[in-house]
Image (tube, coloured by chain):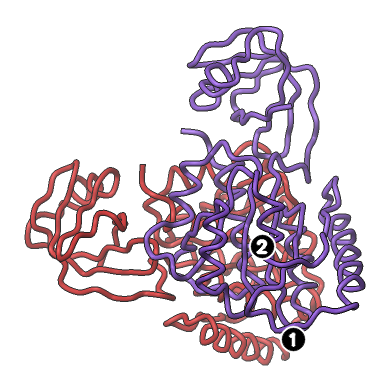
Chain colours: A red, B purple
């Protein structure tokens, strides 16, 4: 079911009201009319199942059928494609990434990956899955993220091909900030974040990702390490798509 | 000198153009006219010293006098008031917080702080200062953050009293999200973030902070540990105030 954003102050008793961009999208693009059922989230941890009672491109009113207290429920799917860094850093990435809302991790080998994977890869993946399970419990997330098998960047790009938005933070990108891209893609619900290993991605890899639909973005003036970049990007994505009020 | 946001595409050769909210603020509030000097940042790591050539409440044009490649220069001051958690977690907080743009850390003892501070406090502070120095170097930050002495929450509140915005992420806040507050405070340049220790702040402490001007906010549906909450909040603040285009 499609999830819409409702401002907390637009929920009154059994009624809720979608306005602005959300109403327009629901009415004009998805053509929801009286009787249709949908989900709304308020960005502060509550989720509502509602039935549409009236709709126009300015406002859509609904009657609430069910309220879910959704701590840990994120109305987004966030995938982190992560170039595997050295040592135990990937443990920290899975730990913090789970807390920060990632629900699928795809560890990738890139040209600058230093670690060698052979038969050990599957035991590492099992270990990361265990870490994700523990972290999900501690952060009260209702679903446990998946950690997929280690693959190449190209394989990962094929896997995420049909997502709404593929973000590639890249220090070579000097024009387009993450803010501009997210502000234009507020309806995105399946978001992929591509982060390189310690040395970053090579130019050829950036081109390859762009050919698969990735958008290169600047994260601003700060320089983040590979183990921090994914968490920071996830926080920014959640901020724009879940916490920020619609204009 | 006051810093304004300029869109990267509004910088052409020696000329730059401020529009929207930035132009209005510069012209109507700060009354900048031809001849005045100011700074502009583009959110992607460049900073410009410019002289105003023409100004109205719609647009302000300037001639660029100097371009600074500002990787590591953040056009904000970010203070983290952090309830000291157990064990070595504060090391991680200072490490990642420095990377995430914090420039002043104020470690505080709160009612739920478990750690006991006696004569050891100053050696701990020295250790955190060393960590901040190392982290600043690695993240190419041009300034090293300060770690102030351990104090009580009340003392910290007095210290940050005159800031533009004091944010208190709090799980008891179910209405107001960080997104709403930041979207209304885009001109804020001195931002303070208050994070409790493991058990969070006690209700009395929340009241005390609010009395000092703090605004309680929800960070959304996810539950963050104390060692992650500050970094996540800092990323969100930078996103809204530095990366996101002005409307």
Question: In the picture, residue A234 is in which quadrant?
Answer: bottom right
Relative to residue A163, is residue A219 depicted above or below?
A: above
Q: Is residue B6 left or right of residue A5?
A: right
The answer to whether residue A247 is visible is: yes
Residue A67 drawn at (x, y percent): 24, 73
> Which of these two is toward me, B223 or A112?
B223
Question: Which quarter of the image is occupied by the N terminus of chain A?
Answer: bottom left
Q: Give the alpha-carbon distance from disc 2 to disc 1, as whole Å.
A: 55 Å
> Which of these two is toward me, B157 or A146?
B157
Residue A36 drawn at (x, y percent): 12, 62
Q: Is residue A47 left or right of residue B95?
A: left
Disc nearest the viewer among 2 and 1: 2
The reply to whether dot 2 and dot 1 touch (C-beta < 8 Å) is no
Query: Could you say whether the residue bearing mark 1 is in a helix, strand or loop?
Result: loop
> Which of these two is toward me, A176 or B187?
B187
Relative to residue B188, is residue B48 depicted above or below?
A: above
* Subunit ID for the residue under disc 1: A
**On residue A154, which mark appears?**
none
> Which of these two is toward me, A11 or A72?
A11
Query: Could you say whether the residue bearing mark 2 is in a helix, strand or loop?
Result: helix
**On residue B154, which mark appears?**
2
Q: Which residue is mark 1?
A: A118
């Amino acid at each position: 079911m499609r999830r819409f954003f409702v401002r907390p102050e637009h929920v009154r008793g059994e009624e809720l009201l979608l306005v602005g961009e959300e109403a327009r999208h629901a009415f004009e693009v998805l053509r929801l009319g009286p009787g249709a059922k949908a989900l709304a989230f308020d960005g502060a941890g509550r989720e509502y199942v509602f039935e549409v009672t009236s709709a126009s491109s300015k406002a859509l009113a609904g009657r609430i059928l069910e309220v879910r207290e959704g701590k840990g429920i994120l109305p987004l799917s966030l995938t982190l494609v992560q170039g595997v860094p050295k040592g135990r850093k990937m443990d920290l990435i899975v730990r913090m990434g789970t807390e920060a809302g990632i629900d699928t991790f795809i560890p990738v080998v890139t040209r600058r990956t230093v670690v060698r994977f052979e038969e050990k890869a599957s035991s590492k993946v099992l270990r990361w899955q265990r870490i994700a399970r523990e972290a999900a419990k501690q952060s009260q997330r209702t679903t446990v993220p998946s950690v997929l098998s280690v693959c190449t960047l190209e394989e990962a790009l094929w896997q995420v091909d049909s997502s709404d938005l593929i973000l590639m933070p890249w220090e070579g990108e000097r024009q387009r900030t993450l803010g501009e891209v997210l502000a234009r893609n507020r309806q995105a619900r399946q978001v992929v974040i591509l982060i390189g290993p310690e040395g970053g991605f090579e130019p050829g890899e950036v081109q390859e990702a762009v050919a698969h639909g990735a958008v290169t973005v600047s994260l601003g003036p700060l320089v983040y390490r590979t183990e921090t970049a994914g968490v920071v990007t996830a926080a920014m994505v959640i901020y724009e798509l879940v916490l920020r009020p619609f204009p």
